[in-house]
Image (tube, rainbow, N blue to C red):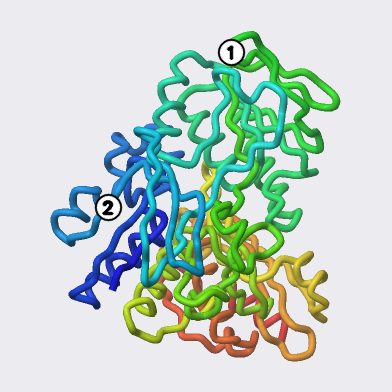
Amino acid sequence: MNYVIIGGDAAGMSAAMQIVRTDKKAKVTTLEMGGIYSYAQCGLPYYIGGLTESSDDLIARSRDTFEEEYGIDARVYHKVTKIDTEGKRVFGTNLKNGESFEISYDKCLVATGAAPVVPPFEGTGLEGVHTLKTIPDAEAIVDDLENASDVTVIGGGYIGLEMAENLVEKGKKVRIIDQASRLGSVYDKEFSKAIEDEAARHGIEVVTGESVERFEGEERVKSVVTGGKTYSTDLVIVAIGVKPNTSMIDDTRVHASENGAIIVNAYMETNVEDLYAAGDCATQYHRIKEKNDYQPLGTHANKQGRIAGINMSGGSQPFQGIVGTSIMKFFDLTVGKTGLGEKEAEDLGFDFETLEFEGHSNAGYYPGNEPLLLKVISHKNTGHLLGLQAVGKNGVDKRIDVAATALYHRMTMADIENLDLSYAPPYNGVWDPLQQAARRMK
């Protein structure tokens, strides 16, 4: 069996490894547009901030490892531009020498990930304007920071906030510009307020509700112009989101969502026979929304890639879906979310109720006790948990993960109250804050 995998990171190589372990006669060819395989994209801000000493530390397995130990034909700088789904061939360009290539397949996986969104701002080609998606992107930013003291981050989402934190830790003056009315708009407004307060506490200039029009400078960027003001700067990082990298299916029968993500079923199959998709280029089924969603995260990519590999090599295992879990560190705060936020619940037509509850990270009498703000959303009629958001210095991850598990199993607030959760004064009170909130919502 001749397998072709387009993309050499989380989803693609999870699939490749599953195939070679299952099908001992498999011929696996992986086509990576860049020069590096299997790296931790989520670790890039921390490499830039100096918490990770070398970019090599972000690489899980090298290309040589895949080739020499597992027999995978792992090619680099091979950009796929077209898929012939009828003739089962992929076409592309070798970015090193400009030569075209054509490879036939029995089964093919599209695992091309996502690309940074860069609106057509005037001046995006100036020196000092960066995006962050790959290790070379991060290395370029690290090098360029030597020339910069004032940095502007465009975008107040996960990457923008993580970059802002790490740039402050590097001693830079940092500004965040976001066209949304508040930072961290994936969260409800109470949590955005906590993020903005933390940004101000660390000297970050926060500009919300302004859209970037252009970058100005001669050879190097000197300023960012919005609809209202001009901001002097030495370096710009554009971090306003990503879009699925799926242009190679444009002239095919492959079904895609409105944003370009390839629509897959539970087995990672597209609507075209023997063509699969997984990771940030594909949709993910959301168990609470009960429909396809798009939440590009490494956790989903690894799971979907593994399942694609199992099914491509003869197995039959479904992807069980997501519940929308995420977490981030922002200086001394941790902010997390799982399930639905208030606006999502409204848009989906749920009859819901909410409760804000301020608990504590551990027993009130134990040193290091910190406030922990929870916002719980539940179904008004059935009592089922619909979502949890949390912010605090300690203990957010524990409550988010408990709630994510509860969402997966469709638990009610009464079920959550009855959970046997761990307790010792350094870690919790006798009633966990999530259970205290559940008691008030029954």
| Any part of residue 202 in sight | yes
Relative to 247, say whether 363 is above or below. below
Judge by depth and name the residue closer to the eye, 252 or 219: 252
Q: Is residue 342 left or right of residue 336?
A: right
Q: Is residue 419 left or right of residue 317?
A: right
3D distance between C-alphas at marks 2 and 1: 37 Å
Name the residue located 58 percent from the left edge and 65 percent from the top edge. 262
Q: Which of marks 2 and 1 is nearer the N terminus?
A: 2
| SS for dot 1 | loop
Looking at the rendered structure, the kind of residue marked 2 is: Ala
Judge by depth and name the residue closer to the eye, 376 or 245: 245
Q: Is residue 108 left or right of residue 113?
A: left
In the picture of the structure, the residue carrying the numbered disc 2 is 74
Position of the C terminus by quadrant: bottom right
Relative to 349, say whether 65 is above or below. above
Position of the N terminus by quadrant: bottom left
Please identify the residue farthest to the left as the structure is shown: 68
Name the residue located 35 percent from the left edge and 33 percent from the top edge. 97
Looking at the rendered structure, the kind of residue marked 1 is: Arg
Relative to 94, say whether 311 is above or below. below
The x and y percentages for residue 369 are 51, 57
Please identify the residue farthest to the front as the structure is shown: 87
Name the residue located 41 percent from the left edge and 84 percent from the top edge. 317
Q: How crowded is mark 2: few (under 14 residues within 10 Å), some or many (20 or more)?
A: many
In the picture of the structure, the residue carrying the numbered disc 1 is 220
